[in-house]
Image (cartoon, helix red, strand yellow):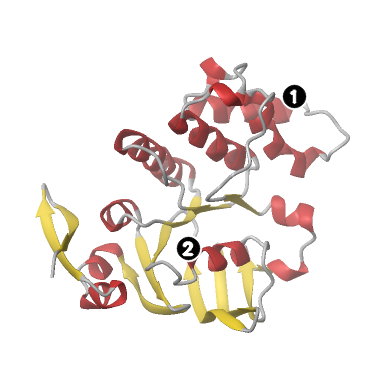
C-alpha cells in the first residue's frame, strides 16, 4: 500500500487555479521532494496533503484512507506538518513544545501518559535536544528552534511527515543537520517524508525522488538524478543551469546569461 496517493488533485482559490490535476504516489519509507519556481503551487500542494486546504477536485489518500473522510484528530495521528513559518510561543519549554505533538493521541484535557513521555524523550534524544529540554523556546538559535519544530512533528508518531521549506533561513551547517537527521529517520525508522526545497542541489542529494511543479502542474516526476539533469528543470526556472559532479554528487549551478 502506498503511503500517500494523490489523485487528479486541483485546488482553486479566489478564482485562480493554484494546483491543477496533480497525481502522484509516494511509497512508505521514501523521501519525495517537491521543487519548482516561486508561485509553482508547492505550499498549496503540501497544505492540501495535510488537510489544511480542501481539494476542489480529486483526492488525497494516506495509508489508503481518504484524507477528506478523517476528522481533525485522526488526520493529526496520520500525517504531520512542519510549516514554513511555524508559530513558536515564548514562555514555553522545549519539552512542553515537543509534547504538543502527543495531543492528537491523548487529547487536550488529559496529561501525557508514561508511553507518551517515553516517545517525547526518544524524539528529544534522536534530535539532540535532551540537554535543552528545560530551556525557554525563546532562547534557542535558529537551528535549535527548527530541530524542535521537527521534533514536535515526529512526536505525533505519524506515518508521513510533510515539511514546507524546513531549512529556510538556516546557515549551511544547520541546513545539513536538519536534512541529515530526517534522512536517518527515513532509513532507520521507515519514515515517509514529503518536503519542499528551494535548494536544488540539496533536494537532489537527499530525496529519493523529485517532483518538478510549475504553474500548479507536474512537469516531471522521477528519480532525483534524472530530474536534476533534465532540461525541463532549466526551462521551468527560466534560467541557465549547469550540473557539475563533485565527489559523485550532482551540484546545480546557476549560470549568468
Which residue occupies the extreme right position in the image? 109
Distance from disc 1 to disc 2, alpha carbons, whole Å, reads 32 Å
Q: Residue at x 46, y 53 (%)?
A: 29
Left/right of residue 170 with respect to residue 194 in the rendered view? left
In the rendering, at what x and y percent does residue 93 appear? 65, 22
| SS at mark 1 in the image | helix
| Residue 256 badge | none
- Residue labelled with disc 2: 27
In the rendering, at what x and y percent does residue 215 appear? 44, 79
Left/right of residue 112 with respect to residue 50 in the rendered view? right
Q: Residue at x 39, y 56 (%)?
A: 197
Label 2 packing within 10 angstroms: few (<14), some (14-19), many (20+): some
Q: Are marks 1 and 2 in contact (CB under 8 Å)?
A: no
Residue closer to the observer: 159 or 164: 164
Residue closer to the observer: 122 or 59: 59
Label 1 packing within 10 angstroms: few (<14), some (14-19), many (20+): few
Q: Residue at x 52, y 25 (%)?
A: 140
In the rendering, at what x and y percent does residue 179 appear? 38, 43
User: Which image quarter is the C terminus in?
Assistant: bottom left
Specify whether residue 2 is in view.
Answer: no
- Residue labelled with disc 1: 114
**Mark 1 or mark 2: whose residue is earlier in sequence:** 2
Residue closer to the observer: 126 or 229: 229
Q: Residue at x 52, y 23 (%)?
A: 129
Residue closer to the observer: 224 or 233: 233
Specify whether residue 18 is in view.
Answer: yes
The picture quadrant where one finds residue 64 is bottom right
Which residue occupies the extreme front position in the image? 257
User: Which image quarter is the N terminus in?
Assistant: bottom right
Left/right of residue 109 with respect to residue 156 in the rendered view? right
Left/right of residue 17 with respect to residue 213 in the rendered view? right
Amino acid at each position: 500500500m502506498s503511503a500517500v496517493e494523490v489523485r487528479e488533485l486541483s485546488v482553486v482559490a479566489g478564482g485562480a487555479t493554484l494546483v491543477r490535476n496533480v497525481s502522484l504516489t509516494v511509497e512508505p519509507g521514501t523521501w519525495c521532494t517537491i521543487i519548482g519556481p516561486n508561485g509553482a503551487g508547492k505550499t498549496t500542494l503540501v497544505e492540501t496533503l495535510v488537510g489544511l486546504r480542501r481539494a476542489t477536485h480529486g483526492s488525497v489518500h494516506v495509508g489508503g484512507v481518504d484524507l477528506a473522510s478523517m476528522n481533525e484528530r485522526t488526520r493529526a495521528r496520520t500525517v504531520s506538518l512542519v510549516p514554513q513559518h511555524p508559530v513558536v510561543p515564548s514562555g514555553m519549554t522545549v519539552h512542553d513544545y515537543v509534547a504538543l505533538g502527543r495531543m492528537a493521541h491523548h487529547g487536550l484535557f488529559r496529561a501525557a501518559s508514561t508511553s507518551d513521555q517515553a516517545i517525547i524523550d526518544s524524539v528529544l534524544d534522536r534530535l539532540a535536544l535532551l540537554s535543552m529540554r528545560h530551556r525557554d523556546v525563546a532562547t534557542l538559535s535558529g537551528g535549535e528552534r527548527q530541530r524542535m519544530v521537527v521534533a514536535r512533528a515526529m512526536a505525533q508518531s505519524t506515518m508521513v511527515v510533510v515539511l514546507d521549506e524546513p531549512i529556510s533561513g538556516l546557515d549551511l551547517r544547520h541546513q545539513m543537520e536538519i536534512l541529515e537527521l530526517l534522512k536517518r529517520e527515513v532509513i532507520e525508522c521507515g519514515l515517509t517524508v514529503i518536503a519542499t526545497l528551494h535548494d536544488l542541489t540539496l533536494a537532489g542529494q537527499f530525496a529519493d525522488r523529485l517532483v518538478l511543479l510549475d504553474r500548479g502542474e507536474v512537469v516531471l516526476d522521477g528519480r532525483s538524478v534524472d530530474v536534476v539533469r533534465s532540461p525541463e528543470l532549466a526551462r521551468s526556472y527560466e534560467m541557465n543551469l549547469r550540473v557539475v559532479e563533485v565527489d559523485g554528487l550532482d551540484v546545480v549551478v546557476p549560470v549568468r546569461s
